Amino acid sequence: MEQAGEYRIPAERAVVWRSLNDPAVLARCIDGCQSMEQLADDRFAATVKARVGPVRATFDVALTLTDMRPPESYVLEAEVKGKTAGFGKGTAEVALADADDGATLLSYRVVGRVGGKLAQIGARLIDSAARKMADDFFSAFHQAVDPTTKPS
Amino acid sequence: MSAETGIGAAVKRREDLRFITGRGTYTDDLNVPGQTYGVFLRSPYARAKINAIDAAQALQVEGALAVFTGQDTAAAGLGDLPCGWLVKSKDGSDMVSAPHPPLAVSQVNYVGEPFGLVVAESLAAAREAAELVAADFEELTPVVATAEAAQASPIHEGLEANLAYDWELGDEAATDAALAAAAHVTRLDLTNNRLIPNAIEPRAALATFDPASGEYELRTTSQNPHLERLVLSAFVQIAPEHKLRVVAPDVGGGFGSKIFVYAEETVVTWAAAKVGRPIKWTAERSESFLADAHARDHVTHAELGLDEAGRFTALKVRTTANLGAYLSLFGSSVPTFLYGTLLAGQYKTPNIHVQTHGVYTNTAPVDAYRGAGRPEATFVVERIVEAAARETGRDPAELRRLNMIEPGDFPYETPVALVYDTGNYQASLDRALQLADYGGFKQRRAASEAEGKRRGIGFSCYIEACGLAPSQLAIQLGAGVGLYESGEIRINPTGSVTVFTGSHSHGQGHETTFAQVVSDKLGVPFDDVEVVHGDTGRVEFGLGTYGSRSLAVGGSALISAADKIIAKGTRIAAHMMQAEPDNVAFEAGAFISGNQRLTLQEVAFASYVPADYPPDLEPGLSEKAFYDPENFTYPAGAHIAEVEVDEATGVVQLVNFVAVDDFGQIINPMIVDGQVHGGLAQGAGQALLEHGIYDADGQLTTGSYMDYCMPRADDVPDFTVDTTVTPCTHNPLGVKGCGEAGAIGSPAAIINAVTDALGTEDVAMPATPEQMWRKLRGL
């Protein structure tokens, strides 16, 4: 699976960077996130309830940040284990750039693969599911970091 | 016997009433008191080390009873799942068998391989607990592709290579010499696509253990319950045979995939005693895709030599056969003895040599599936013959006719170890050409072209070897079991008849055809005959159903048993009629001497109430027989396919299919037609739709009906089927077997039609619209 995308986020680059490294913000933005724990500066562990086509499961997610270049880019390595639902592995390159009006342009490129039931049943659906998860995440992230959004 | 129910009558299947009214009893329909539920833990990886399995959290789930792993089954001394046919490499060495524990112990070798069993009070609790078993795997590099497996580093620890055997048959030097001297050599590279069997009923098991008697009972979806019991007793060593009963109740299709003894029923049976409660396991469809034995998956290079006149002089075949991660029960025999021996086809090719490399890969085990080796052999022979006809500018039907074994040539010994007893291949070809209106093809082609469709016609003159036999020869060649069948006929005191067969019906219609055979032979009403099968507790022994053997071998055993009934009845009747046994004839259900007549029913009653009875004869009228065939039977036929390929979409429509088969004598023509129709649909599935695909990581990407395309009614035409008859010369019914022919002959015929339509030999199965669309555009 390969995927890339770009999002314009109405916040300064430093704010966006900080939020991307904030487990509380991430937990709020990942749909179905049940827990998010920072294990070290560059490591997070999460539990996420998600659905890919007919495969519905609680996934254990291990995130590792590498190639940190604050506040410009990092590489996010994800290992997802869904027990009987299978597994996923992926690497996301995330880069931030200044946009006009004090906004930030976030671009990402993901390369990943899935196994077990996710591959067996979900292979055909995985791209659209991943795209939807990314869109949902960034629209929530947009809300979370937008200074005009009122705290809820 | 009545013309409506005897041999040759199209009797409606008596079992169908219960099936179509929802009264069939399949394994999953059975429930027993105290029953628990099993869910298997399956590897998500194609190849990985098992570092640890932690079930502590799973066992906290309410209702969870136990979690068993490969460590547990190994500690309990449970044996490996065996391969029942020892194939030898050409250097004389035994095949290399990778150990196959029922539950993976230290390493998993294909996606879906079971490594644990969770048992709970309910299915929901078992599933919930399974979710909570934490297994720590360390991924290893898998080997997936058939063609590259032999050279890749070995997937199994302790094995030197992924080569299970390097097998050969035939005279290589003579074949090479004949090819060198040939006027023309046709060369072809062929792939026989991996198939995934999809019986309508998934596999299931319900195991119980009675601590009072120490007896296990396994009810399961098996094509051969006695073989299952034999393997579980002798090899896996769960319990001795007298403490293990295996019952195969109604079984919803098998096609070979339910011959084999699998991990699931094995572990469930063992665990029933450990848990002290009955355990039921029923596969979900996605488990069937992963863990039922797959089929075919060959890569082949073939060369056919012809002389100036078009006579075949030599056939050389090099095949790599994917055996999967482990040798399944008969997996080793399918691409060797069931494949190489069939490469003469219907032709007098004097020199044949075949070499098969059986390779291990990190994929599901591959074993017999409708046809088992013979569809693969037919595909090689009939594709290369068709290609040779095109290359040398000959009519494909006439090139076949020129090379066919003629009726006067029988018995005919092939260069690949078989002796064909009888046949008339020209007769089935002639009839097929007539039914297909071969002469009118050009006109039909022109009409299709006018509608933007390429039309093609393709032939397949197949032969198969059925009713595997004789036992002694097969055992010499490596078979681990005999290949006979048992039958028993009990005439009950008031004259009704109970028939026991070691053969098994899971769609074939034994309850009807076997009753027809016995009622015809004994002259008793069809409705008075009941057929019992599929229960080691009721039937003495048997080898089940595979290889189109049931009627040829199992039916013959019943004829032997019926002969014994008649012989004993004759002595009883002679005594009662005060005649000499030699002067008593048996006709239409009655013993006749002069003007005296006693029905079989009267004689049966006398045998159980022996008032006036021969003093030297035991009471009762019940006889059993074992029948071991002298030879294989050789069904053969001619299949002609016509396809249209839509230039715009690439869609291949199978527009006409003619099958003329020679199955020897026919007991029930309606059931035979049904068997042919089903086989043809499966063959069309292989040729046009079905493909089991693993990606480079060894993940099965065609693991559901979204991606694995099964044939539907609108994918096949209204088949034209007919039969020609040359009775089998060596069994009492003159029958040959009809269960697999449709799937054996049709893929080659369909692909020959597709290649004819496209004007290229380079078409892979399945001929999908995408592939056709690209070929039509030279992409």
Image (tube, coloured by chain):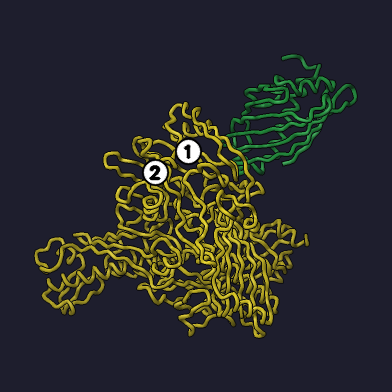
Residue B122 is drawn in which quadrant? Answer: top left
At 31% from the left and 56% from the top, the residue drawn is B539
Mark identifier at residue B137 = none
The quadrant of the image that shows the C terminus of chain B is: bottom right
Task: Tell me the yellow chain.
Answer: B
Work out whether B547 lies above or below B391. above
**Which one is earlier in the sequence, the residue at label 2 or at label 1?**
1
Residue tagged 2: B269
Q: Distance of mark 2 from mark 1, alpha carbons?
A: 14 Å
Callout 2: helix, strand or loop?
A: helix
| Crowd around label 1: few <14 · some 14–19 · many ≥20 (10 Å) | many
Q: Which residue is mark 1?
A: B69
Residue B586 vertical position relative to residue B546 in the rendered view, above or below: below
* Type of amino acid at the residue the image marks with label 2: Thr
Give x and y (percent) for residue B438. Answer: 62, 76
Q: Please state which amino acid type lies under the numbered disc 1.
A: Thr
Residue B500 rendering spot, x and y as whole percentages: 31, 59
As drawn, the chain in green is A
Residue depth check, mark 2 versus mark 1: number of the one nearer the observer:
1
The front one of B461 and B361 is B361
